């Protein structure tokens, strides 16, 4: 097997940008691609400090540039392709579900068609979501049946099932990952942890859907990146791996923890709002398979992780007001 040569699709996403940085930190040379130009430096961890590996960026839209992407792959002969490119917002997927289906199903299947003919490809990592399971009861394993409850979740479940057919029929060297709620420095301000921190810093009210009753496991993106690299290099072909900790917290408890860290009052900072339609009350992923087969474990506690994001917000405080605080849909 050749030395790994990485292509990361969707590198402008929070997870993609963080993984690019982690690869460069480990000494890998990386081609980073996304459909838009690189965003502000505050959102790109790989811009914050010098890394041993090199990073090149190129604009590629899987909805429109698959022919060019195929040529890039054949020219560069990437051995490892990691795909973070997706339409990912849950609530907004109700407004224009066809856009979610286009990216997460149609273009994703077309990508699979492209990948099956690359004889130099050692591993394709398909980054997907536990939303495909719907609400769950207890800690679920990777063989849990799909029960999606939103257009976003339906689109990801369809893309996931398509990938399985390509693995079974064409021996596509693919693996899948599903991570619980990821967070960390550089995450978009409309996500709950940076949104709560920024609201507390600016004095704005934080809207909390449903009063924050939903239960989640939050995991730091550095732990996720470490797991993703292990899966890319050593994961079993056709396997799916859950990336998750076991520290359960409700959204309300999470916000209370953040506000306490910043010396703020919950009642003064939070506005309770109705629950959004189709919202899953809980999904808790059992990461036993990843821990036992590949020797991974999460290292960063929620308290330490929140401190990490607070430090990032304080470092970039003068710039955050100019960055998007709500999701801006791009078809």
Image: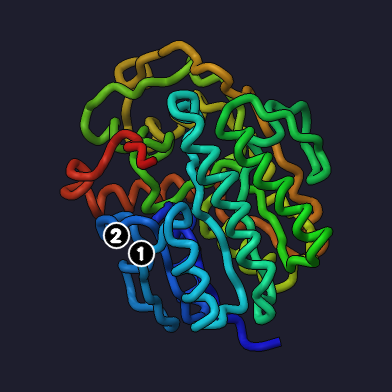
User: Please, is residue 154 above or below residue 315 in the view?
Assistant: above
The N terminus appears in which quarter of the rendering?
bottom right
Q: How many marks?
A: 2
Q: Position of residue 195 (x, y in %)?
A: 35, 35
Q: What residue do we see at 80% from left, 67% from top?
A: 171
Q: Position of residue 150 (x, y in %)?
A: 59, 26
Side of 204 relative to 117 (left or right): left
User: Please, is residue 126 above or below residue 230 in the view?
Assistant: above
Q: Nearer the viewer, residue 304 or 25?
A: 25
Q: Is residue 297 visible?
A: yes
Q: Nearer the viewer, residue 324 or 183?
A: 324
What secondary structure is marked by label 1? strand
Residue at which label 1 appears:
59
Compare marks 1 and 2 and give the one earlier in the sequence.
Answer: 2
The C terminus appears in which quarter of the rendering?
top left
| Labelled pair 1, 2 in contact (Cβ < 8 Å) | yes
Residue at which label 2 appears:
37
Q: Which mark is residue 44?
A: none
User: Please, is residue 158 above or below residue 150 in the view?
Assistant: below
* Res. 53 image quadrant: bottom left
Side of 292 relative to 30 (left or right): right
Q: Nearer the viewer, residue 82 or 60?
A: 60
């Amino acid at each position: 097997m050749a030395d790994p040569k990485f292509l990361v699709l969707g590198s402008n996403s929070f997870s993609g940008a963080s993984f690019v940085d982690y690869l460069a930190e480990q000494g890998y040379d990386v081609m980073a691609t996304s459909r838009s130009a690189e965003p502000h430096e505050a959102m790109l961890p790989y811009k914050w400090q010098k890394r041993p590996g090199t990073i090149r960026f190129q604009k590629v839209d899987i909805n429109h540039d698959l022919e060019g992407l195929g040529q890039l792959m054949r020219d560069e002969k990437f051995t490892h392709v990691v795909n973070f490119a997706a339409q990912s917002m849950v609530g907004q997927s109700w407004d224009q579900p066809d856009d979610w289906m286009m990216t997460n199903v149609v273009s994703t299947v077309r990508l699979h068609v492209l990948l099956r003919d690359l004889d130099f490809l050692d591993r394709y990592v398909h980054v997907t979501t536990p939303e495909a399971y719907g609400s769950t009861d207890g800690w679920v394993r990777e063989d849990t049946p799909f029960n999606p409850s939103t257009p976003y979740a339906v689109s990801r479940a369809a893309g996931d099932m398509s990938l399985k057919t390509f693995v079974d029929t064409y021996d596509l060297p693919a693996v899948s990952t599903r991570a619980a709620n990821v967070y960390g420095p550089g995450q978009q301000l409309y996500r709950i942890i940076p949104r709560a921190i920024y609201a507390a810093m600016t004095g704005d009210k934080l809207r909390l859907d449903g009063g924050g009753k939903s239960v989640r496991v939050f995991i730091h993106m550095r732990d996720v990146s470490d797991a993703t690299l292990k899966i890319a290099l050593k994961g079993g072909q056709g396997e799916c791996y859950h990336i998750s900790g076991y520290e359960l917290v409700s959204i309300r408890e999470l916000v209370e923890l953040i506000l306490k860290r910043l010396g703020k009052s919950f009642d003064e900072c939070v506005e309770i709002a109705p629950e959004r339609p189709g919202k899953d009350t809980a999904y808790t992923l059992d990461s036993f398979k990843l821990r036992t087969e590949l020797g991974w474990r999460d290292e960063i506690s929620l308290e330490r992780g929140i401190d990490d994001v607070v430090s990032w917000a304080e470092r970039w405080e003068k710039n955050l007001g100019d960055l998007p605080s709500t999701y801006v849909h791009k078809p």
